[in-house]
Structures are given as structure tokens and as C-alpha cells.
Amino acid sequence: MRNFSKKILIAGLFFYLPFNAIAWGVLGHRIVGEIAESYLTSDAKKEVIRILGTESIAMASNWSDFIKSDSTFDYLSPWHYLNLKGGLTYKEVQTFLKTDTSVNAYTRMNFLARQLKNKQLTKEMKAFYLKLLIHIVGDIHQPLHVGRPDDQGGNRIMVLWFNSPSNMHQVWDSRLIDFQQLSYTEYTQAINHTTKAQRMLWQKQPISEWMWESYQIAEKIYSDVLPDEKLGYNYNFKYIQILERQLLKGGVHLAGLLNEIFKVRGKG
Ligand SMILES: [Zn+2]
């Protein structure tokens, strides 16, 4: 009897994990949101407050994952990622992004940014679109959200994280971040250090460049893991700085995008 329930538990865990691994974990999104909040212009800040009310960007950042429990929003699932096969060159990725019209994180970010500039949009729709945009910008800075289709962005590459069954997507979504044992505000405080010059440089990058950077990191991740490999201290040591750089860039990119969208036109 005991053995039987143990088996069910293990089977349950096995099926539960890959489907649970869908995005930066709760912490990752909040860190990106908290960093973005710190770099908003006063115009953008005002507009964000007008749309979200008392909810911070950090606290609004996970809503797009939470609504996945409601099947009405199933159509939004492909908005969270863009799968690209391995081995593509910079030019191939850029050409793809320029010509592809399918529903994915890239085309939807552009769509949302356009929509949010529309003055006629109701406040309710603005809130809906803004929460989606905040979330998706975070998502695509998790490199495996620009991963390969054959393994669903690393979801099908099973590994052990220390001794617990996991997969590569989940390691990058949440395992590495959770391992640091920091709250999202503590984490933000620890990594949110940029110079103005650096922010200007990052904020000049078009969204297609964000995608390329994530894709390149994803390629590196793929080249450096074996199926069923046991990952732990060494993996953390090797990759945590790359991950934190992505959280930081995600926040700075999001701020730049929101500043652009909510710029009061005709004002210096
Ligand atoms: Zn997501």
C-alpha cells in the first residue's frame, strides 16, 4: 500500500513538473518588474499608476501566468515564448523575426506596444495589455523562452537539480533563482546596479536584439547539458551571473519600452 502510493506520488511529480515549468518563476518576474519600476520616467510612472492603480509592476508581473488556470485565456499560451530551431545565424534570426507573422512572444510584444499607444483604448483593455506586456518582456529574457521547439524550450530535457527531478526549462525559470534564497526586493537590491550609459545602450536595442541575445544564451545552455545530468553547485557557479544579467537587462529593457510607449508627445 505504502509502495503503491509512493509510486503514484512519483508519477504525479513526473507529470506535474514539465507542465508547471512555464515561465520565469514568480520571483524572476517580480525582480524584472521591480527593476523596471526604478527606471521609469515620471510620465511613464504616472500612466502606469493610472492604469494599474496601487498594484506595482512587480506584483502585476505574474498575472499572465496566473490566468492560465482559466481556460478562457488558453489562446494566450503562445504569447509567452518564441521557439527557434538550433544553429541559426544572427541574420537568419533577424530575417525570421522580420517576416514571420505567427502568434508568438515577439509579434505579440510589438502588437501590445502599438496598442498601448492608442489613446482611444479603454482603461480596462490598457490594464489587460499592460500586464501582458510586463510579463512577456520578462519571459523572453529567460533564455529558454527563445529555445528550441523539439524539446519545448528545454521542458523535455530532464535533469536532476541537486537530487530533485527537474528539467532545463525549470532550472532556468526558478530553480537557480530560488537557490539564492532572496526575496524579490532583496534580489533587486543586490543586482540593480547600472550606469546611465549602460542603460542608454541597452534601451537603444530593438526588441529583435533582446530575442537574439536570449537565443544565443539558450544555444550555450543546450551545448552544456546532458540528458539526466545532475546539476548543482557547479552549475549555479557557472551560470548565475548570466541569469542575473538577464534579469537586470529585462528590467532595464522593460523600463525603456514603457518610457517610450507612455512618452507625452510634444514634450521635450
Ligand atoms: Zn510566461
Image (cartoon, grey):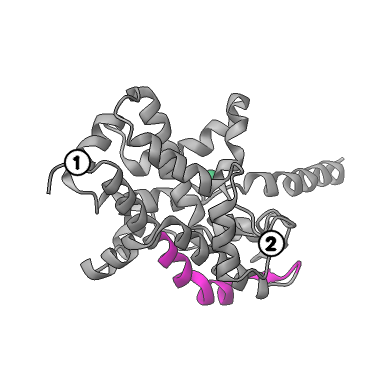
What are the residue bounds of the magenta stretch? 227-247
Residue 58, position as x, y percentages in the image: 36, 44
Q: In this view, does 116 lie above or below 193?
A: above
Element type at mark 2: loop
Q: CA gap, disc 2 to disc 1?
A: 40 Å
Quarter containing the N terminus: top right
Residue 250, position as x, y percentages in the image: 40, 57
Marker disc for residue 265: 1
Which is nearer the eye, 138 or 263? 263
Q: Mark 2 points at which residue?
A: 85
In front: label 2 or label 1: 1
- Packing grade of label 2 (10 A; few <14, some 14-19, many >=20) is some
Of the residues shown, which amino acid type is indicated by label 2?
Lys
Residue drawn at (32%, 60%) of the image: 203
Element type at mark 1: loop
| Left or right of residue 59, residue 219 in this image | right
